[in-house]
Amino acid sequence: KQEVTQIPAALSVPEGENLVLNCSFTDSAIYNLQWFRQDPGKGLTSLLLIQSSQREQTSGRLNASLDKSSGRSTLYIAASQPGDSATYLCAVKTGDGNNRLAFGKGNQVVVIP
Amino acid sequence: SQTIHQWPATLVQPVGSPLSLECTVEGTSNPNLYWYRQAAGRGLQLLFYSVGIGQISSEVPQNLSASRPQDRQFILSSKKLLLSDSGFYLCAWSRDRGWSEAFFGQGTRLTVV
């Protein structure tokens, strides 16, 4: 069974600092890995999708890397802003043919103005 | 473009009452559809997924059921709610491809009293 872990569970950073969020998974047989953002009481917004054959994806200030062999992904957010405060979720799509996502519990981020 | 609608946004129901949550997807055909539940401190748990009309797979035994009466409609139901059914319910869709991205609705906050 795929298990996804996100460390740290919560962190606070001053505005302007770079954010580094870590995700690890136990089974490297994945289709892809997806990072989501969730604001309180809201649904999930997809941020970045990395296919299993890719090493990284970038969108604006966001960069996500994937090391499938070691079961790790890192989300970098450059020059953090108070609007980046949210919970960030990592999910891997299992490679068992059922197209299911296994989620971590999230990194709760607060950017202090 | 594709959109996903989920309603209602908030629901307060007494113990023992029935439940019906609806999710519809627009702008695509034959999507994979998913119901997740998010409980505080426990992450997202996959409840049901469907690869086609009338095809439902259940991930965990519970008090809930799901149905897919139309290609882009997914319904989560219960005949008699329990207190433990309280939580945040999220519907999601993806294309029927292992590498495809997943998209989520805005969620339903269910409180059973």
Image: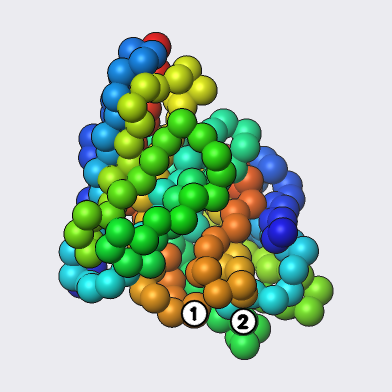
Question: Depth check: A66 or A27 in front?
Answer: A27
- Asked if the residues shown at circle 1 and circle 2 are in contact, with their CB atoms under 8 angstroms apart, the answer is yes
- Distance from disc 1 to disc 2, alpha carbons, whole Å, reads 8 Å
The residue located at (36%, 50%) in the rendering is B91
The residue located at (61%, 47%) in the rendering is A106
Residue B43 point in image, percent of width and height: 59, 42
Q: Give the residue type at disc 2.
A: Ser
A27 relative to B8, above or below:
below
- Residue B111, quarter of the rendered image: top left
The residue labelled by disc 2 is A52
On the same chain, marks 1 and 2? The answer is no
Report the chain holding disc 2: A
Q: Give the residue type at disc 1.
A: Trp
- Residue A51, quarter of the rendered image: bottom right
Q: Secondary structure at mark 2?
A: loop
Residue A33 point in image, percent of width and height: 58, 70
